[in-house]
Amino acid sequence: MKKVILAFGAIFCAFGVDYANAARLDVSRLTQSGEFSATFGAAFKSGENKDGTSQTDITAGRVHELGLDLDYTFLDDWTISFSTDNDYADSQVGIKWKWLTGDSFKLDLMADYGIAWTKNARTDNRIGANNIDFGARIHGVAWRDFQWALKVMGQVVFASPDDFWNINLNAEAMYYFRSDMATKVELEYNFRQIAQPTQYNRAAEFGIVYNMSGTASVHPYIKYHFKTENADNDNSVPDDWWKFGVEFSVEF
C-alpha cells in the first residue's frame, strides 16, 4: 500500500497544461455557473463483521447502499450540495469554493454539515449524530488524458457523551484510453478517533468511467476495504469487505 501511494505521489508531481475531457465524473472537472447535476448509485457489500455476522447476502439481492448527491453551481466559483452519503447522519448539506482554477492545478475549499434528523419514536433519542467536515482538494490534468486529485478532510462528530474526530485522506487518478472511456483508481486512508486506540481504515477502488453523452456518465466499480487496525473493541462495524457498485451522473 505504501509503495502504491508513493507511486501516485510521484505521478502527481508532473503537471500538464492540456485539458481534453470534462465529463461529469472526471476527478478534475470544473462546474460552470448555473449548472445543476445529480449523482446516484447502488452497491452490494460482501464479507462479515468481526463477530461472524454476515454483512450482506448478495445472492438474496439485498442492496446495501443507495446514495444521492445534488450539486448546484452559482457565480462559477461556488457550489452548494445536498447528499445522503454520510456515515453518521441522514444527509448533509455543503458548500465548495473553487479558489484556483487553472487547467493543470486547481484548489477547492469545502465544508459540509451532516444532519441527524431521525429519532427513536419511543425514547426520542436521536439516531446518528450531527457532524461537520471541512478540508481542501487539489486536482489537475497532466499529459492531456491523465487526471489526478488529492483531498484532505477533517470531521468532528457531535456524539453523546463524547464528541470525536476523523481525518480522511483520498487520492484519485483517471486515464482516458478512449475519448469517451477512462479507467479510475481511488485510494482512501482514514483516522478514526471514535474509539481508543485510534482506528485506521484503508480502502482501494478500481472502476471504469463511460461518458454516454456530454451530460451523462456511468461508473461501475469494485472496492476493497482492508482489515481495520486497532478495531478489536468493535464487533458491530463491518470490516474486511468487497463492494460492487455502479454510479450514475447527470447534468441539467
Image (tube, rainbow, N blue to C red):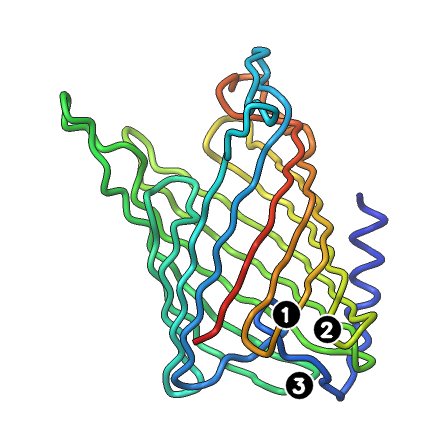
- The amino acid beneath tag 3 is Asp
Query: Residue drawn at (61%, 44%), measured in percent from left and top?
Result: 245
Residue beneath disc 1: 212
- The amino acid beneath tag 2 is Asp
Residue beneath disc 3: 103
Task: Please provide percent x and percent y for residue 191.
Answer: 57, 41
Residue 179 relative to residue 58: left or right: right
Count neighbours of disc 2 (C-alpha within 10 A) and say few if under 14, some if 14 to 19, many if 20 or more.
Answer: some
Disc 3/disc 1 C-alpha distance (Å): 23 Å
Above/below status of 206 relative to 249: above
Query: Residue drawn at (57%, 76%), measured in percent from left and top?
Result: 107
Residue 45 relative to residue 236: left or right: right
Q: Secondary structure at mark 1?
A: loop
Q: Is there a contact, CB below 8 Å, between mark 3 and mark 1? A: no
Disc 2/disc 3 C-alpha distance (Å): 19 Å
Whichever of labels 2 and 3 marks the residue nearer the N terminus, that label is 3
Q: Quadrant of residue 100?
A: bottom right
Total labels drawn: 3
Q: Is there a contact, CB below 8 Å, between mark 1 and mark 2? A: yes
Residue beneath disc 2: 180
Above/below status of 235 relative to 182: above
Whichever of labels 3 and 1 marks the residue nearer the N terminus, that label is 3
Task: Please provide percent x and percent y for residue 49.
Answer: 57, 19
Query: Residue drawn at (71%, 85%), measured in percent from left and top?
Result: 19
- The amino acid beneath tag 1 is Met
